[in-house]
Image: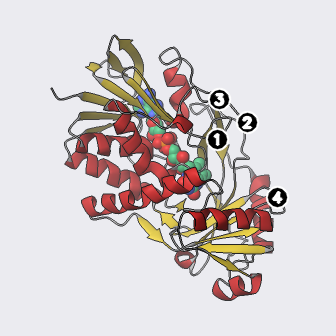
Amino acid sequence: MVRHTVVVGGGVMGSAAAWHLASRGDQVTLFEQFPPGHDRGSSHGTSRIFRLAYDDAFYVGLAVRALPLWRKLEEETGREVLELTGAVDHGPVGATEALHRALTAAGRPVERLTPDQAAERWPGLRVDGTAVFHPEAGRVHADHAVEAFQEAARQHGARVRHGVKVTRLAVRGQRVEVVTDGEEAVVADAVVVAAGSWTPGRLAGVVPGLPPMRITQEQPVHFPAPDALGWPSFIHHGGPDEAVYGLGSLDGVKVGFHGVGPVVDPDHRDRTIDQQAVARLQKYAERWLPGVDATEPAALTCLYTTTPDEDFVIDRRGPVTVVGGFSGHGFKFAPVVGELAADLVGGGNGLDRFSMTRPRTGG
Ligand SMILES: Cc1cc2nc3c(=O)[nH]c(=O)nc-3n(C[C@H](O)[C@H](O)[C@H](O)COP(=O)(O)OP(=O)(O)OC[C@H]3O[C@@H](n4cnc5c(N)ncnc54)[C@H](O)[C@@H]3O)c2cc1C
């Protein structure tokens, strides 16, 4: 019998899950509350950093696993989604050496650079102390990636329905009743909840034991730069402010502080741009990014959904699989997240690190 699986949420994670599930033969229906290309969640815009460098072998391995899956998505859809321009990490020696060790242990190429060597290669970027570069990194075009996952899912028979909100989920034995704002009621064999910042609200009373998730509104800025698309992605560890990340994109060089925004309700948030935060990024750019025009910032807002230990949740309770808590670093792993979700729906085991009942750490 063909399994009918409903996916709630058409951001990058739900779309990736729909692709894997449909390609394995599930009859998939994906419901997304907003129109295609909306900018009210976490997956919009022209750029996300792809990188292998984590000071944690687990995440290095996950990113290594994602790389060929991004290429498979590109092959299936004929679209370019991931462009490798490399990544520069700079800051205190402890931070850069930890990354160098982790990449070397995984057998991936990485090199140390002095500030002078870095300045010669990327005159627009000033590095602070020590630096490492790894080439298997770069930029994912976020909007194109979401579109490509949905397109690939459709090619395998999935129905992708925008403008339909799931208003109720109710577990009925081994199945789940899914009700939409159009008063449709579907009884599915399995549901994947990939509702981003709406996940805790959507799952209240449906799946017990979900770790707390903190929803914040983050506000990166694009600065014009003549050669933005040639920039490597970069992270400035332990800089003068919080950690700063950035990368070149079609919109300029995107720069942001990691996870510093205010806590918000995803349905009732003030999308007003915080001009003081913009001014701090301009100050940062004046000092560390001589290749951008710091006088012309263009800010955007985006939601982080963060668990206390900053690990994701990818787990199943009966017929309900949950993928959530991807904070500010989930995008690069999307094709693996979709694969893990499809494994769980198919009765496979998840990864302990992403279980709902892992020991809690962090705030
Ligand atoms: C500023 C910023 C920068 C980032 N930079 C990077 C980066 O450089 N590299 C990286 O790897 N990651 C990065 N990330 C993280 C990454 O973008 C997110 O982890 C990822 O996009 C989360 O995707 P998602 O599908 O879980 O959530 P979302 O994209 O929010 O998707 C959830 C979807 O579910 C829909 N939905 C919710 N409830 C319902 C319902 N009841 N019915 C129907 N639909 C519903 C929503 O409308 C939404 O479209 C960044 C995030 C932000 C905010």
The residue at which mark 1 appears reads as 310
Amino acid at circle 1: Glu
Nearer the observer: mark 2 or 4; the answer is: 2
Q: Is residue 226 visible?
A: yes
User: Mark 1 near mark 2, Cβ–Cβ under 8 Å?
Assistant: yes
The amino acid marked with disc number 3 is Pro
Q: Position of residue 96 (x, y in %)?
A: 72, 67
Label 4: how many residues lie within 10 Å, few (<14), some (14-19) or many (20+)?
few
Give the mark nearer the N terminus: 3 vs 4: 4
Binning the other alpha carbons within 10 Å of mark 2 as few (below 14), some (14 to 19) or many (20 upward) gives: few
Identify the residue at the far top of this view: 173
Going from the N terminus, do you reach mark 1 or mark 2 first?
A: 1
Q: Please state if 273 lies on the left or on the right of 87 as rendered.
A: right
In the depicted structure, whether residue 156 falls above or below residue 144? above
State the residue position of label 3.
Answer: 359
- What residue is shown at x 54% (from left), y 79% (from top)? 230
> Residue 114 — which label?
none
Q: Earlier in the sequence, mark 1 or mark 4?
A: 4
Residue drawn at point x = 51 percent, y = 37 percent: 196
**Quadrant of the image occupied by residue 220:** bottom right
Disc 1 from disc 4: Cα separation: 20 Å
Determine the CA span between mark 3 and mark 4.
31 Å
Q: CA distance from mark 2 to mark 4?
A: 21 Å
Q: Disc 2 beta carbon < 8 A from ligand 1?
A: no
Q: Nearer the viewer, mark 1 or mark 4?
A: 1
Q: Is residue 215 left or right of residue 162?
A: right
Q: Which mark is residue 241?
A: 4
Residues marked 1 and 4 touching at CB (< 8 Å):
no
The residue pinned by badge 2 equals: 362
Q: Quadrant of the C terminus?
A: top right
